[in-house]
Structures are given as C-alpha cells and as structure tokens.
Amino acid sequence: MKQTSKYEKIQQIILGMKQPSYRYRQITTAIFQHRIREFEQMKMLPQSLRDKLIQELGNSVSSVTPVLEKQSSQVSKILFAVAGGERVEAVRLRYKRGWESYCISSQCGCGFRCRFCATGTIGLKRNLTADEITDQLLHFHMKGHALDSVSFMGMGEALANPHLFDALSLLTDPQLFGLGHRRITVSTIGILPGMYRLMEEYPQVNLTFSLHSPFDEQRSELMPINDRFPLQEVMKALDRHIQHTGRKVYIAYIMLRGTNDSLEHAEAVAALLRGRGLWEHLYHVNLIPYNSTDETSERYEQSDRNRLMTFVQVLKSKGINVTVRTQFGSDIGAACGQLYGEVER
C-alpha cells in the first residue's frame, strides 16, 4: 500500500485551504534551495497556511532527529531518532576528489540475520517510511553538504521495504532532491520480487548484490535468505537485469578470514560469473575487507593482505572486473556491516 509522503500532504493542505498552487513550489524552494528547516520560518507563506502545516505535520520539516554524531577523517556517522523510540544510522563519506556520498538506512534493524552483520543481530523492528528514509539525506542537505550520490547500504534490506520505491520517487523528483537515477545504488541480499520491480520501475538505478559465498550450502549458513531465494535463481535475475538495463551489476563480497577467502572460493566466484553470455563483462566484483563488530555471535576476522591480493589475481586472470573497496569509518563503527543503532554499547 502506497504511503502518503509529507510532500503529498503539503499539496493536499494547499488544495484544502484553496491556496494558489504556486505555494507548493514556494515550500519546496524554501526546503531545498534556502534550506529552511521549520514551517514557521517560511515567512513567504501566509500565517494561516503555516499554522495548518504545523498542525498537520509538526513545525520541523524533517521526521528524523539527530541524536549523536561520530566523526573520523573522511567519515561522519549520525544516529537518528525516529517515531516509536527507534534509532537508525546514516553515514556520510567524503572522498579526496571532493565527492560526497551517503549510506542511508531503510529499516530499523534487519530480519535476515546474516551471521557477520551487526544490524542483523537486532532483528527487524519496522520498515522506515519514505519520509524517514529521505529525511536522512535531507539532514545532510540542510547542513549545506552536496548530495552527490546515495546508497541503500545502511541498516536493513532495502528491497524488503515496499516504501523504498516511494523513497526513490522522492529522491528523483526534480522539484525535491532531484538526484539522477545513476547516482543511486540499491544493495540487496537477493530479494527476487524487489529486484524485478527495481528493474522495471528504476532500470537506471545501480544494483549491488551481496554474494559473500559462491557455494550454496555455505551461503545458506552465512545468509539464511539463500534457502528462500537460491543463488542460481538470483543470478538468473541479475542476468535479466543486465539484459534489460544494459547497466553494470555490482557483486559485493566481504572477505572473511578462513571462511570465504580461499583459492577455491576465488575460482568458484569466477566460474559463477563466467559463461553468462554476451553481457558477462557487466558484472563487477567489489571485494570488501571485513569490519569486526562486538555484536555478531561469530568472531569473524579480516582476511590478510596476501589472501586478498591472491583473490584479486585469480579473478583478474579469469577476466573478471574486480575492485577492492576502500575502507572508511571502521574506527567509528560506520563501515560495512557495523551499523547497530545504539547510543551506548
């Protein structure tokens, strides 16, 4: 069921009060160009309209409240309070070339319980609304930061939340965030219905698939979702995605020492991605150094440098495109798989 976003509610209020339609443009300009955070401060609007907006939506434009911020050299992590007393985290990455990228959350917690992920130990509290998803980005925008690119790699499985698609609509709306589709990345552990819907509705949005093991039995052990949506079925869906969109698909692979970083694993990853037809060159592997957490039941460790480089060499020798992901934010618990959403550990 589609939710009504605050932007739609604003339009309904304007209509209900028989205000001229240009009032909506005034409000979106106030938010996105002048970075005005409160309806009461929108002095270009008549007081009666401001009062009605505050009555219906509250004075703050945003539905998320920053509670805590941690910073390291190129990363800042914000803990937000959302309705119901829950907490979610978002991360801002600053690259040396001046690019600003954001990693935002789609759920409070996550119900899929991947064994190496801190967020999965919480369980699923609830889906975030489209406003709560996009307001994480709005927070950074209000602070004057450029919104260069955004990835759904924070807390939760984005494609398990139907409100993701409403959020994508808001993010790509030229009157609102105005983000180009190719500047958005959705990461998934392999939720097939969501993958097919993304392919149809947002074919230019980047797709990242979390693989983490090329062997079905081991993948099911690490990621129980593999029993519901088996790897070979997901790979067929990725083939279709590439054929339909003509875009790259990224394969995320967290390197766990002694678990999935062997020569045998590297060769099996290459075998999985080779022989997939004319489009196989559009698969691109991102190897991710593991970031340890205190929350996961298994104490996984990061692969050593030699293992990592051997893995890279095997993939390259088989003609697979591969990048080792630069590590950011592990010192403040802001790296891949570390988001936990607690004020105090």
Image (cartoon, helix red, strand yellow):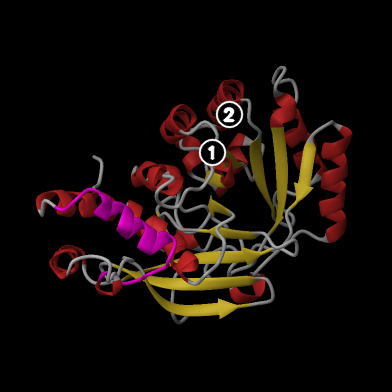
- Residue at disc 1, secondary structure: loop
Residue 124 lies left or right of residue 264; in this view the side is left
Which quadrant would the N terminus be assigned to in this image?
A: top left
Report the front residue among 129 and 270.
Answer: 129
Label 1 vs label 2: CA separation?
Answer: 14 Å
Residue at (51% x, 78% y) in the render: 69
Residue at (55% x, 65% y) in the render: 91
Report the front residue among 343 and 134.
Answer: 134
Residue 279 lies left or right of residue 190; in this view the side is right
Q: Amino acid at mark 1?
A: Val
Q: Can see residue 265?
A: yes
Q: Amino acid at mark 2?
A: Leu
- Quick one: label 1 or label 2, which is nearer the N terminus? 1
Residue, disc 2: 238
Asked if 19 appears above or below 68 in the picture, the reply is above
Q: CB atoms at circles 1 and 2 under 8 Å apart?
A: no
Report the front residue among 170 and 280.
Answer: 170
Crowdedness of circle 1 by 10 Å Cα count: few (<14), some, many (20+)? some
Q: Which residues are magenta?
A: 19-39
Residue, disc 1: 205
Residue 268 lies left or right of residue 148; in this view the side is right
Q: Can see residue 124?
A: no
Give x and y (percent) for residue 6. Answer: 26, 55
Give x and y (percent) for residue 234. Answer: 54, 30
Asked if 314 appears above or below 200 in the picture, the reply is below
Residue farthest to the top? 277
Give x and y (percent) for residue 176. Answer: 40, 51
Residue at (35% x, 56% y) in the render: 28
Does the segment drawn in magenta span residue 201?
no
Question: How many discs mark residues in the rendered view?
Answer: 2
